[in-house]
Image: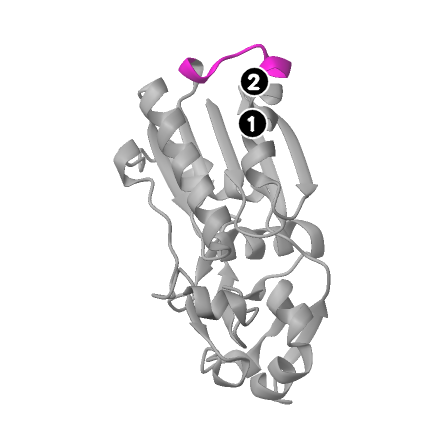
Amino acid sequence: MKLLAFESATDACSVALECDGEINIDHRIAPQQHAKLLLPMIETLFASAGIKAADLDGVAFGSGPGSFTGVRIAAATAQGIAFGADVGVIPVSSLQALAQGAVREHNASRILAAFDARMGEVYWGAYALDDDGIVRPLQVDCVCAPEKVIIPSDAHLHKWCLLGTGADQYRDELITTISENVQLDVVGGCWPNAQDVLRVAKLRATKGELLSAADALPVYLRNRVALTEEQRARGERL
């Protein structure tokens, strides 16, 4: 199987390519550089593997939530490559990719994933490791204030890993909200990685769960995806 994956919903710009069992990765922390970097990174991995887009069996991408611009870049890139190669796409939640990375890097089995959503809010998801090695959502990803996050009712029965830029930004608020009865490891400085998008997507690809290129759509969660001139003048950010 030849499967391309990329993730650009945060400051991380990340690409992974699996070619007949061999995986190559390019992962960089590059704020506001995604539009310039993503396609050259993909082309470099293609060249290293000796393939072209037409050889792919599918394209996976981090569909968000996250930066409006970054999520839109990923979706548009997935559409363009998939249309050109006449292959299907696999959208993967960027929060799920972050949680899958916690399994790989920290041996976590229950994960609370949070991105800083600006405006005093977080993008939030709760995940649990399944028997097949893939994390599954325990509830629908959402956007809310740190003080309003919801955790599974049985959270006190498990040890959790809390990570992501939302956890970095709102560590104290989230710890207070989650409750002292929950066992919690807080891990800082974590970003979603394309190799984890690939890990999640590969299982779905083997099951034939690819969508048409037209369905490579971004997930914003928040309805507000643009700022007025007045809001920009005040220094507000999405």
Q: Is residue 197 left or right of residue 83?
A: right
Q: Residue at x 72, y 59 (%)?
A: 189
Which residue, given by chain and number where applicable, does mark 2 sit on?
A: 46
Q: Which residue is mark 1?
A: 17
Give the residue type that dot 1 points to: Leu
Mark yes or no: residue 117 visible: no
Task: Work out whether residue 95 or residue 131 is closer to the camera in this orientation and state it.
Answer: 95
| Rendered position, 165 above or below 213 | below
Q: Is residue 53 magenta?
A: yes
Whether residue 159 is visible: yes
Q: CA distance from mark 1 to mark 2?
A: 8 Å
What residue span does the magenta drawing correspond to? 46-54
The secondary structure that dominates the magenta segment is helix
> Where's residue 161, x and y in %?
64, 68
Which residue occupies 49% across, 29% down? Answer: 4
Residue at horizontal 37 percent and vertical 54 percent from the top? 219
Where residue 125 appears, x then y in whole percent? 48, 66
- In this rendering, the answer to whether 235 lies above or below 31 is below
Q: So how many labels did they put on this image?
A: 2
Q: Quadrant of residue 118 in the image?
A: bottom right
**Viewer-nearest of discs 1 and 2:** 2
Few, some or many residues within 10 Å of mark 1 (<14, 14–19, 20+): many
- Which quadrant of the structure image shows residue 209? top left
The one nearer the camera, 46 or 160, is: 46
- Where is residue 171 drawn, in percent x and y? 67, 77
Q: Nearer the viewer, residue 137 or 41?
A: 41
Cβ atoms at labels 1 and 2 below 8 Å apart: yes
Give the amino acid at mark 2: Phe
